[in-house]
Image (tube, helix red, strand yellow):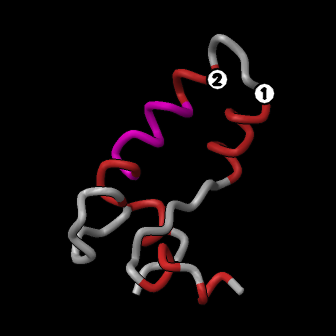
């Protein structure tokens, strides 16, 4: 089903690895700034409007085309 999503077809996926997912799930005063810092660059790359811009988390996870 993931392959039918526009974000996947356009190469705009963001992968939440175990460290990032853990930081979000803990939602503490220490983990949320870490999670937001990790997410910032991927979000900027995913929403810049250029499908050629690589999303680093997706590339590291092997999801990028």
Q: Secondary structure at mark 2?
A: helix
- Residue at the far top in the pictured view: 29
Q: Which quadrant would residue 22 be assigned to in this image?
A: top right
Q: Which quarter of the rendering shows the N terminus? A: bottom right
Q: Is residue 39 magenta?
A: yes
Q: Report the residue at 65% width, 82% height from top.
A: 2
Which is nearer the eye, 9 or 25? 9
Which residue matches tag 1? 26
Position of residue 26 relative to residue 52, above or below, is above
Residue ID for mark 2: 31
* First to last magenta residue range: 35-42
Q: Quadrant of residue 40?
A: top left
For residue 65, side relative to residue 26 (left or right): left
Q: Quadrant of the C terminus?
A: bottom left
Classify 10 Å Cα crowding around label 2: few (below 14), some (14-19), many (20 and above).
Answer: some
Cβ atoms at labels 2 and 1 below 8 Å apart:
yes
Q: Which mark is residue 2?
A: none
Q: Rate crowding at label 1 as few (under 14), some (14 to 19) or many (20 or more) other CA atoms within 10 Å.
A: few
């Amino acid at each position: 089903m993931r392959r039918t999503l526009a974000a996947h077809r356009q190469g705009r996926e963001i992968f939440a690895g175990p460290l990032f997912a853990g930081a979000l799930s803990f939602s503490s005063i220490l983990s949320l700034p870490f999670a937001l810092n990790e997410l910032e660059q991927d979000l900027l790359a995913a929403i810049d409007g250029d499908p050629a811009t690589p999303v680093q988390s997706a590339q590291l996870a092997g999801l990028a085309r």
